[in-house]
Image (cartoon, rainbow, N blue to C red):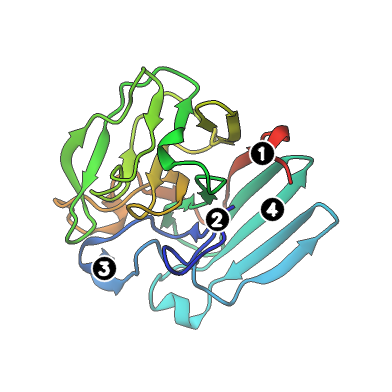
Amino acid sequence: MWQANPEFWGSHAPNLFPIIGCMKDDTYIYNDKTYHMPKHGFARHNDNFSIKNQSDSSITFSLVSNEELYTYYPFLFEFEITYTLSKNILTITHKVTNLDDKALYFSLGGHPAFNCPLSKDENYTDYFLEFEQPENSQSHLLNMTNGLLTDTTKPAFTAGNRIQLRPDLFNEDALVFKDLKSRIVSLKHKTKGKILTVNFEDFKHLGIWAKPNAPYVCIEPWLGFADNETTDQKLETKEEVLKLDAGSTFNASYSIEIDQNHLL
């Protein structure tokens, strides 16, 4: 896992809720009222998570709506994140419970970062991402000024199911995929083989990102993505927004499997 070197990017693996990416003007409209919402939502920098359950192999953190959060997000909810370790596999489970008497609208996702390259005698270009199926999905470009999705796309795959890592790959920000066939992707070295695998079966979308020329790569399972430039800013009509009925619960998990040959 990336060590959060602030010279490049000072995070490890943020959890994204209740939005992903940017909203137009950092605002949205719900019931004719305008609300402020920071990039990737409020969960990733929130200090109010509490430990709900803990065992030798797992831990669950919980964030419950409060008066302050209600000014950003006018819903009553509980957002839980459970980390479960089984041998060389870490599973991250997101659970959203609607505690309100009305429908709740949200997006969620992970943002784990991985060291790349792994050793000083290697180059970034020694690595590539390999997907489980041949892909023809194109990356949706982001507006570099406001972080919103554009209608412009560009090819990202080589050899059918690979994305070659290179220092300039993220000069135009993240690669954003809306319609991948695959739900499994591996980080591989050209001679040493598989380093790790991310299984994102419960997630429809994927982001891949790093700061240009930085020694890491983020593989980000998403349910949702940034606003489109043409958005009407209404939360209920946001593209791919999830709707959770009153009293209902939603779960989504992804896993990170470290290859046995690369365990410390």
Residue tagged by mark 3?
Answer: 26
Secondary element type, mark 2: loop
Look at the image and tell me whether residue 185 can be seen: no
Question: In terms of sequence position, does the residue under pointer 1 or pointer 3 come before the other?
Answer: 3
Question: In terms of sequence position, does the residue under pointer 3 or pointer 4 come before the other?
Answer: 3
The residue shown at (56%, 45%) is 118
Q: CA distance from mark 1 to mark 2?
A: 14 Å
Q: Is residue 203 left or right of residue 90?
A: left
Q: Is residue 63 left or right of residue 33?
A: right
Q: Amino acid at mark 4?
A: Tyr
Does 26 appear above or below 13?
Answer: below
Looking at the image, the residue that sits furthest to the front is: 121
CB atoms of marks 1 and 2 within 8 Å? no
Q: Nearer the viewer, mark 4 or mark 2?
A: 2
Q: Amino acid at mark 2?
A: Trp
Relative depth, front residue between 67 and 4: 4
Residue tagged by mark 2?
Answer: 2
CB atoms of marks 1 and 4 within 8 Å? no
